[in-house]
Image (spheres, grey):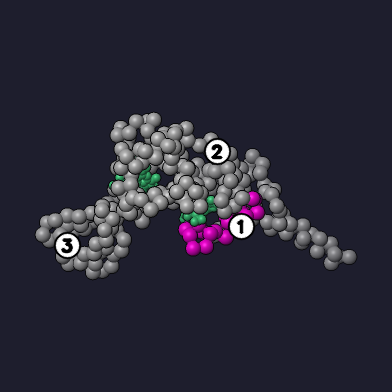
């Protein structure tokens, strides 16, 4: 008799803890508040305080591509995404559900996307904005900055707008600009790709790879600023809305946009 009760109790306890639910059992306002706190501490650094991306994926979307339901969302938060920067997490099971509840609420807040015209935005990207000088979209464009082919899946409208208007606000360390000065006085700058004791490799503004021996350099330094120029004042507010609308719709080759 005792043994049976014990089994029942254990089972019940497990049922609360383990993600044996198909949907999130922790979605009360206080769960959401706790989830937000945890999110801001552990996730916002990569996904942005409002979930619209940065280093991590854009979470402020109606349906997450890797986590269409609560169960997969729980698993992603718990175990991360292998071979990407998305880490596993050692939170309590309940805390994971609370963060998951908050992540889902981000999609509800931001689902009304950008107001601009994506067709005009594409024209600005390729024309006046000169974005392809540094960025690839599909097979066109430069390679100095990150490809924008799937930028809409990684960043929401808020983050895109911030990057265009204030690019220095959030510069990933993988894309830091290096400034090099040779012993002959010539200077060159580009994205640092690699560096060891003796040499440094950069990708210059034209996208070319260059390697230098440090002994040939008078000095070199890493810039804190991004090579990405600010478009504040260079493009009208309407043009920036159009750009954001266009970029937010770029979902990579699979999304079909190009
Ligand atoms: C070090 C950066 C980093 C941190 C910290 C981080 N993530 Fe991520 N996350 C990523 C990256 C990068 C991806 C995209 C992985 C890929 O390529 O699919 C991702 C993907 C995701 C996805 C899948 C998105 C989709 O489109 O389906 C979810 C959900 C997610 N993260 C939630 C979280 C939560 C919740 C936290 C905090 C507990 C967190 N992440 C912490 C970097 C991070
Ligand atoms: C002179 C080169 C240059 C030009 C021109 C340029 N960018 Fe960038 N951009 C970069 C670099 C380098 C980065 C990566 C470092 C960073 O995030 O600051 C970047 C980052 C970005 C990001 C963030 C990418 C990500 O993966 O999160 C977006 C979005 C972006 N640029 C959009 C644009 C748009 C839109 C234009 C045109 C209106 C443009 N850029 C013009 C160099 C450039």
| Towards the viewer: 91 or 45 | 45
Whether ligand 1 has any atom under 8 Å from the Cβ at mark 2 is answered as no
Question: 5 above or below 163?
Answer: below
Question: 126 above or below 69?
Answer: above
Q: Is residue 44 something that shows in the picture?
A: no
**Residue to which mark 3 is pinned:** 217
Q: Residues within 10 Å of mark 2 (few under 14, many from 20)?
A: some
Q: Residues within 10 Å of mark 1 (few under 14, many from 20)?
A: some
* Boundaries of the magenta span: 69-87
Left or right side of 188 for 31: right
Question: 119 above or below 13?
Answer: above
Using the numbered discs, state the Cα–Cα distance from disc 1 to disc 2 in whole angstroms: 23 Å
Report x, y in % for residue 98: 62, 48
Q: Nearer the viewer, mark 3 or mark 2?
A: 2
Q: Could you tell me which residue is drawn at 70 percent across and 52 percent down?
A: 22
Left or right side of 247 for 132: left
């Amino acid at each position: 008799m005792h043994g049976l009760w014990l089994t029942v109790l254990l089972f019940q306890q497990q049922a609360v803890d383990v993600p044996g639910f198909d949907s999130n059992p922790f979605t009360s306002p206080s769960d959401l508040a706790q989830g937000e706190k945890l999110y801001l501490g552990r996730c916002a650094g990569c996904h942005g305080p409002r979930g619209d991306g940065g280093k991590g994926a854009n979470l402020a979307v109606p349906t997450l591509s890797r986590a269409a339901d609560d169960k997969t969302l729980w698993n992603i938060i718990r175990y991360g995404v292998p071979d990407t920067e998305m880490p596993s997490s050692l939170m309590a099971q309940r805390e994971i559900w609370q963060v998951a509840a908050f992540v889902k609420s981000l999609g509800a807040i931001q689902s009304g996307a950008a107001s601009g015209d994506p067709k005009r935005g594409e024209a600005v990207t390729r024309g006046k904005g000169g974005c392809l000088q540094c960025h690839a979209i599909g097979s066109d464009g430069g390679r100095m900055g990150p490809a924008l082919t799937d930028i809409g899946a990684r960043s929401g409208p808020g983050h895109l707008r911030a990057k265009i208007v204030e690019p220095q606000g959030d510069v990933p360390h993988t894309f830091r600009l290096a400034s090099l000065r040779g012993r002959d006085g010539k200077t060159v700058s580009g994205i640092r790709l690699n560096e060891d004791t003796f040499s440094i490799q950069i990708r210059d503004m034209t996208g070319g790879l260059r390697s230098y021996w440090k002994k040939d350099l008078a000095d070199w330094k890493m810039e804190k600023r991004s090579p990405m120029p600010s478009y504040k004042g260079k493009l009208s507010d309407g043009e920036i809305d159009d750009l954001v609308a266009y970029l937010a719709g770029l979902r990579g080759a699979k999304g079909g946009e190009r």
